[in-house]
Image: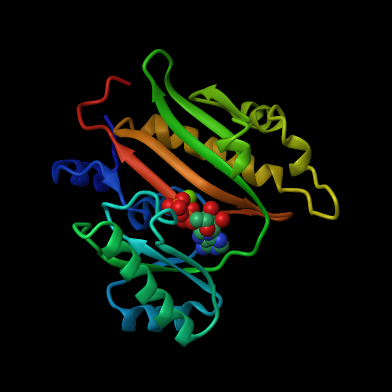
Amino acid sequence: MGNAPFIKKLRKDGRSILTEFESKNFLRQKGIPIVETRLARTQKEAVLLSQKIGFPVVLKIASPDIVHKSDSGGVKLGLKSVSEIRMAYREIMDAIKKQNPCAVIEGVTVQKMAKSGIEVIVGASKDPQFGPVLMFGLGGVFVEVLKDVSFRIIPINRKDAREMIEEIKGYPLLQGYRGKKPADLPALIEILFKISRLMEENPEIKELDLNPVIAYEKGALAVDARIILEKEEPLF
Ligand code: ADP
Ligand code: MG
């Protein structure tokens, strides 16, 4: 099944990994809150787009061959002027060319620099036994080192989503601590619920990551996204 024409076309072209830019455009259409993100093909275009978006901005490598952008030197945060944009553009291209000279480079994405908040992760993948599953956790060391995450089989309802959030060990951090503001739980619940529905409606999606979503006292915003499609016809 699967009814997104955009996904059908990509699969026809033999592509299975969507770039961050493509993933974000798709997810925005599906109602997920996504930070403003544009694609610049040249350094000049990167400067123009950052002036349009307004400083501070973020520059990131845009390449179908580079999945871990910061590990490759492909992410520059908090750029505040035209000269900083120019320098960041050059540094990104130098780093990528050194690391992966064969990578196809589309350019860079120019993004609004999101305010700081609490970083969380929302993911979906397909378990060979259970089928599509949804994951939630706190960003950074909480997921990578402490594996503090919760899972549910898709589909979920909003009550399941709330329970997923409440059951991670780091939940108190979302309730606010040491002067930090609490996170907007209904906004996170809505994202989990929408991702569950999107996975149900698009069985061609094999894996999906919003890493991170930044949670605020009011609202939440995904600043990075990745979608991987099934190579074969999906079983579920
Ligand atoms: P990677 O491919 O390495 O995961 P990300 O796009 O996630 O690259 O960027 C790395 C980190 O930079 C994120 O985890 C987040 O903390 C920060 N970041 C990325 N994009 C933005 C943005 N638009 N605004 C603010 N912070 C950002
Ligand atoms: Mg990321």
Q: Residue at x 63, y 32 (%)?
A: 146
Q: Residue at x 21, y 46 (%)?
A: 10
The reply to whether residue 233 is visible in this rendering is yes
Q: How is the image coloured?
A: rainbow
Q: 163 or 88: which is nearer to us?
A: 88
The reply to whether residue 222 is visible in this rendering is no
The quadrant of the image that shows the N terminus is: top left
Q: Quadrant of residue 168?
A: top right
Q: 42 or 151: which is nearer to us?
A: 42
Query: Where's residue 195, x and y in %?
Result: 48, 38
Q: Residue at x 45, y 33 (%)?
A: 124
Left-right relation of 202 to 31: left
Farthest-out residue, front: 98
Left-right relation of 54 to 118: left
Query: Where's residue 167, x and y in %?
Result: 70, 27
Q: Quadrant of residue 25?
A: bottom left
Q: Quadrant of residue 181?
A: bottom right
The quadrant of the image that shows the C terminus is: top left
Query: Where's residue 190, x and y in %?
Result: 59, 41
Query: Where 156 falls versus 42 (above or below)?
Result: above
Query: Where 138 falls versus 212 (above or below)?
Result: above
Farthest-out residue, right: 178
Q: 129 or 85: which is nearer to us?
A: 85
Left-right relation of 18 to 38: left
Query: Where 16 falls versus 102 (above or below)?
Result: above
Farthest-out residue, left: 13
Query: Where 19 falls versus 84 (above or below)?
Result: above
Query: Where's residue 107, x and y in %?
Result: 29, 68
